[in-house]
Amino acid sequence: MTVHTALLQGSRLLEDAGIVVPRLTAEVLLAHALHCERVYLFAHPERELSPLEWLHYGRYLHERLQGKPTQYITQRQEFYGREFRVTPDVLIPRPETEHVVEVALQAAAGARTIPRNVLDVGVGSGALAVTLQLETGAAVCGTDISPAALAVAAENARRLGAVVNLVVCDVMNAIAPASMDLIVANPPYVPESQREGLQREVRDWEPPLALFAGATGFEVYSRIVADAPRVLRPGGWLVMELGFCSLAQVRDLLNGWADLRVEPDLAGIPRVIAAHI
């Protein structure tokens, strides 16, 4: 079995099963099985797979056909130009969440004083916390209710050379008053009523704690906005990712905050909301 034939067969299997971008998925899974970069596949189409490599590739294809996201198979996802390890204990970082980083950096640049202490609420894989620490050099803390998620975040911080203090707690109830200059969050915002309508890759594989907020989808937003004035220093910023169609209600929650701004994603959908006390 050559690389060329393996890619053809894998792509066909994935396409017949309705998997999106079947060719790219086959390439990623085969490169993972061969412990190489995708470019190697294009340069060596005649390369013969060993029996072990074929076995691994077949297993990865089977897992993807069962709905397991490619990122959980390879345990890799790029975020803001860095490669993060991901497992089913954490939400897969989305490109849209990079807008949170951009808005946070803009808020920091425009702040009266340089933000020296940053909090990531619901740190998950550590994508936001690690990125902001490396981009700003600030003292960054991340909280999560899941010890398993914090273990993934700790590994990513160590591997990427970021210094992030991680705390097991619910939202930010373990964070000291007036201790932070900037809070970022990509909170759970999917209402429980929408569970069955999600893609199976999301519904069946990503951690429910990171997806579902409660009956309305605004429960965690409400808790963050209510407690942020206690945790933030005067002039401190709160930056949060927005769920689909959540802008109006989250904006109402921030009534009374200053310099409220909304940043759309590349599709023009409101993606990030920010304000300061």
Image (cartoon, rainbow, N blue to C red):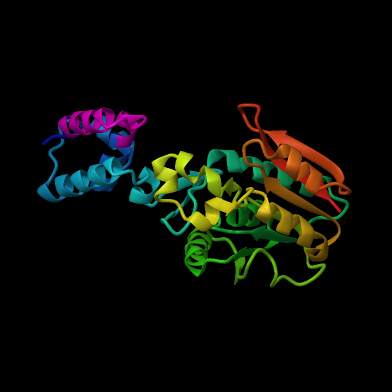
Q: Is residue 131 above or below residue 252?
A: below
Q: Do we see residue 113 in this rendering?
A: yes
Quarter of the figure that contains the C terminus: bottom right
Badge count: 0
Q: Residue at x 15, y 30 (%)?
A: 5
Residue 208 higher or lower than 165, as above or below? above
On the question of residue 125 being in view, the answer is: no
Find residue 131 and report its horizontal and vertical position in percent: 60, 52
Instruction: Name the spot of residue 136 as percent of width and height, x first.
Output: 69, 53
Which residue is pictured at 22% across the width and 32% down the height? Answer: 13
Residue 77 appears left or right of 10: right
Q: In the rendered view, would you say 61 is above or below 84?
A: above
Which of 122 and 78 lies nearest the eye of the viewer? 122
Name which residue lies at 69% across and 66% down: 172
Q: What is the chief secondary structure element of the magenta stretch? A: helix
Residue under the point 66% across and 35% down: 245
Describe residue 140's horizontal placement relative to residue 248 as left or right: left
Q: Which residues are magenta?
A: 4-25
Q: Is residue 139 left or right of residue 235?
A: left
In which quadrant of the rendered image does the N terminus lie? top left
Check if residue 21 falls in the magenta segment: yes
Q: Nearer the viewer, residue 196 or 137?
A: 196
The question of residue 94 being in magenta is answered with no
Seen in the picture, residue 134 relative to 247 is either above or below; the reply is below
Q: Position of residue 193 (x, y in %)?
A: 54, 45
Instruction: Measuring from the top left, give residue 169's x and y in whole percent.
Output: 62, 70
